[in-house]
Amino acid sequence: MEEAKKRDLVFALDIGTRSIVGVVGEACNEKLKVLAVEVAEHGGRTMIDGQIDNIQKVADLARKVTNRLEERLDVSLTQVCVAAAGRALQTEKGSYALELPAEQIMDEELISQLEAGAVSQAEETLKAAEGDRKQMFLVGYTVSQYRLDHYPLTVLVDHKGTKAEVDVVATFLPGEVIESLYAAMRTAGLQIASMTLEPIAAMNSAIPAELRLLNLALVDIGAGTTDIAICRSGSVVGYTMATIAGDEITEAIMQTFLVDFSTAEEIKRSMRKGESVVYKDILGLENSISYEELLAAIQSPMERLAEAIAKQITEINTGTPSAVFLAGGGSKLCGLREKVAESLGMDERRVAIAGNNFEKSAFSEDVDLQNPEYTTPLGIAISSALGLLNDSYVITLNGERAKLFRSGVLTVRDVLLMNGYTYQDIIGKTGKNLSVTLDGRRIMLRGEPATPAILTVNGEESTISAVVHAGDHIVFTPARHGKDAAMTLGDFLLEQLSLDNRMEELSVGRVLVNNQEVALDVQLENYDVILMLDKASALMESASKMQQEEAEKGIVAETAEPSKAASTSLKVILNGEELDLPAKESGQPYYLMDLLEYSGIDFEHLEEPVSLVVNGEDSGFQRIMKDGDHVNIC
């Protein structure tokens, strides 16, 4: 048995909710020549809404279809092209900004970093919304807006600025959808040669590239999913799905005529205008129903399907398209085409059943291809055979075949993002800074810088904006994030007093952290306030410095709004006695630190830490005081 690869044959499997369709063909004069088609139905509900539920049973049926094709063509089929259903597609918006150290010209590398950051931000938003959901795989993204120094642009390359921003709309598939498809194919003894999305595959078979200058919608109605793709101006601009499909029609027939699922499917397929259908119900009674009776039974779910299709098309296309093509087994349902046209407010002639355009990209000497049910399987094969998808190329990432989804040109950045890496893996993240205040002076301890990622393509150092080609070998070691700034109180004081030539003060003075005396080996935390009480005036000096700094920077505590905090005078209850304070000449509010000099405490001979309580709550020096506050400093 000859290897299919030696004959340059393409083998595609469309793994649907109701059946698996296998297609084998070869490229011939820029078309797909279809050599054989095999169809087999699932024995039970092994697929749910287009997603694999029982991996073993799906694998067994895929193997059965493969064996039939191998016997018919006397070839060995080991590599398969597949498509993931659009049922689980999830879309999220993302934004990102790059602050440049100086005015720079925006090149491809900077733009790649910018877009990668926005895609990762979209993924993080999606993960947060989904909770503990598994890894998400990038399907594709579109840039909705660039900005440079806050000025909107449609093209960023070669412009010069200091701050670049981008907004994107990214589409993801949950990792379990992809992994189950790979697992089923491995169990069937097949290796995935390419993967795309079902709506993209359907578009490639039903709507040739030369027609995509028009605003068209392709609706692939399967048993469990209704996938939708939109094209305009020469390319696919969006895809979505409706949560209702052919199974809802079948279930309505089951309920109305008291039949099992398989009988209901047969009744649906036999529906012809002017003809009756004879069937047996679950009681064993033979019945006959007219076309009109059957149409009445499915009217409600068919209207819901048509309305759902119209709603999704209108939302993603932001309006009614020029024409709509219906594909998939559900498209043959009598009356559906007219209902879709009515729901969209279109002329019925602008809504057509797909199939007439298959001949532009595929032909066969033995198989009748003018069947809308062949839209997706033909599209998968056409996409691979005619090189319409870069994901038909074999690209390895760290020694394994990369998972790829997008059509068009692929960059290293695309490959990394599609395989679960994030912007932080590519660029790295500097450790968090640690901000503390020492004697009224803010000090920033810097986090450790990231260790850069290592990236090579075919053994040579590369950039994330580099375009990848068939057979490329990518090796990527993610950037290592820098450690967060961390320091003990003792190490911090040694460092700071050494810098200030005040080493003698550490041994003779007392130190408070957030108004509490602590051990020198305690780890500092963000926004800690450290006071060295080595002299009688130390505390008051620190209070004065802090007040001055806060006033200059306009920084206020979270407990009050600045506009509300400022006052002409202040009346508080300090240690049980009224205290009237005149307005400050600066117009600044009074802080808790201002009240220290009125507390009556001898700061030169402190025996224990000072307690600061405002209205029954422990407070810090930066708290803004308000009329009527009850303050205890002791």
Image (cartoon, rainbow, N blue to C red):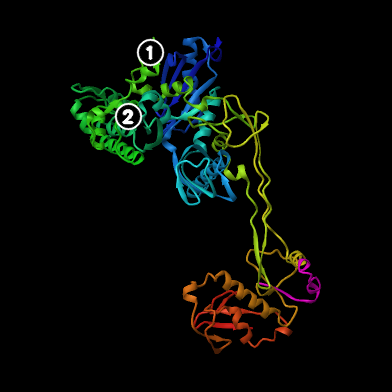
**What residue is disc 1 on?**
367
Compared with 535, 111 (above or below) is above
Q: Secondary structure at mark 2?
A: loop
Where residue 315 sits, quadrant-wise, is top left
Determine crowd level at label 1: few under 14, some 14-19, many 20+ residues with C-alpha closer than 10 A: few
Q: Which residues are magenta?
A: 497-513
* Residue 164 is at least partly visible in this image: yes
**What residue is disc 2 on?**
260
Distance from label 1 to label 2 (Cα)? 32 Å
Determine crowd level at label 2: few under 14, some 14-19, many 20+ residues with C-alpha closer than 10 A: some
Identity of the residue drawn at 26% across and 29% down: 350
**Coordinates of residue 631 in the picture (x, y in percent):** 56, 82
**Coordinates of residue 8 in the picture (x, y in percent):** 52, 14
The earlier-in-sequence mark between 1 and 2 is 2
Residue sticking out furthest to the bottom: 577
* Residue 20 is at least partly visible in this image: no
Q: Magenta segment: does it hold 506? A: yes
Compared with 460, 63 (above or below) is above
Identity of the residue drawn at 39% across and 10% down: 366
Q: Amino acid at mark 1?
A: Val
Q: Amino acid at mark 2?
A: Asp
Quarter of the image with the N terminus is: top right
**Coordinates of residue 16 in the picture (x, y in percent):** 42, 28
User: Viewer-proximal residue, 556 or 311?
Assistant: 556
Quarter of the image with the C terminus is: bottom right
User: Viewer-proximal residue, 70 or 263?
Assistant: 70
Identity of the residue drawn at 65% across and 61% down: 434
Could you tell whether 34 is left or right of 528 in the image?
left
Compared with 291, 598 (above or below) is below
